[in-house]
Amino acid sequence: MPYPASIQIVGDVQGSVESRFTDSGIVVTRFRLASSPPRWDQAQGWVPGPPLHYVCTAWRDLARNAAESLVEGTSVLVFGRITEVREDTQWLSVDELGVSLRARIAYTEEALPGPAAAAPVKSAPATPPRPAPRPPAPGAAPEPAEARVLHNVAGYNAAGWGPADICPRPVDFRPAPNHL
């Protein structure tokens, strides 16, 4: 049976990552990967399927970087070629490898956090108190009850803030005339 030219897998590293050198000095790194692609269940919707097992082999610089970056449990994205299938395990020659950012932050050599990242966080200054509610202008009509309820639901005007506090002059939302 011919194997596909390439395959893409998302899975978690299982066990330890092993690196060795060939007789000619080339670095080879091997790690196991478990992937549980989702499947549709009529009663529960999308659920994780049975795990698929892979043995991944990386060479040269990719192998060196994988050995330095991967530990058990790391979620990775693998792009590679199937080289062998034994029992329930597929063997892959890895062409590209990336750490999944779904559950962690990755730092590159160029973007390592500086010493300030380890410094304690200073508390933010206290927010200034809101102004007291404005009394209605003499002779002004009271605000309709519907508007008060809507404003309070949205948190607007809950502490006496009104449109004049946010935008002191009326804004014209009509489109500007088109002068060509």
Image: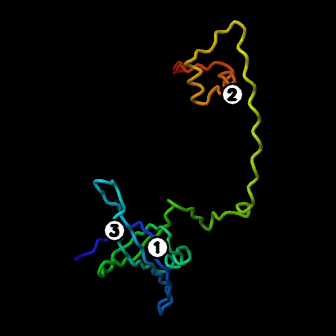
Task: Provide residue 147's location: percent of width, then percent of height.
Answer: 57, 19
Of residue 177 and residue 61, the one placed in the foreground of this image is 61
Q: Quadrant of the N terminus?
A: bottom left
When the figure is inspected, residue 4 is found, relative to residue 116, above or below; the finding is below
The residue under label 1 is 13
Quickly name the residue at label 3: 50
Q: Residues within 10 Å of mark 1 (few under 14, many from 20)?
A: many
Describe residue 74's horizontal placement relative to residue 117 as left or right: left
Which secondary structure lies at badge 3? loop
Residue 137 location in percent, x, y?
72, 11
Answer with left or right where residue 15 lies relative to residue 167: left
Q: Is residue 29 left or right of residue 48?
A: right
Q: How is the image coloured?
A: rainbow
Residue at the image point whose x is 56% and y is 24% from the top = 150
Q: Is residue 130 left or right of residue 62?
A: right
Measure the C-alpha gap from mark 2 to mark 3: 55 Å
Give the amino acid at mark 2.
Ala
Asked whether disc 3 touches disc 1, contact meaning CB atoms under 8 Å apart, the reply is: no
Return the residue nearer the eye: 122 or 60: 122
Residue picked out by circle 2: 159
Q: Which residue is the extreme one toward the bottom? A: 23
Whether residue 41 is situated above or below residue 79 in the rendered picture: above
Circle nearer the viewer, 2 or 1? 2
Q: Amino acid at mark 1?
A: Val
Q: Amino acid at mark 3?
A: Pro
**Regarding mark 1 in the picture, which secondary structure is present there?**
strand
User: Is the residue under label 1 in contact with that under label 2 (CB below 8 Å)?
Assistant: no
Q: Residue furthest top?
A: 139
Residue depicted at 40% across the width and 69% down the height: 79
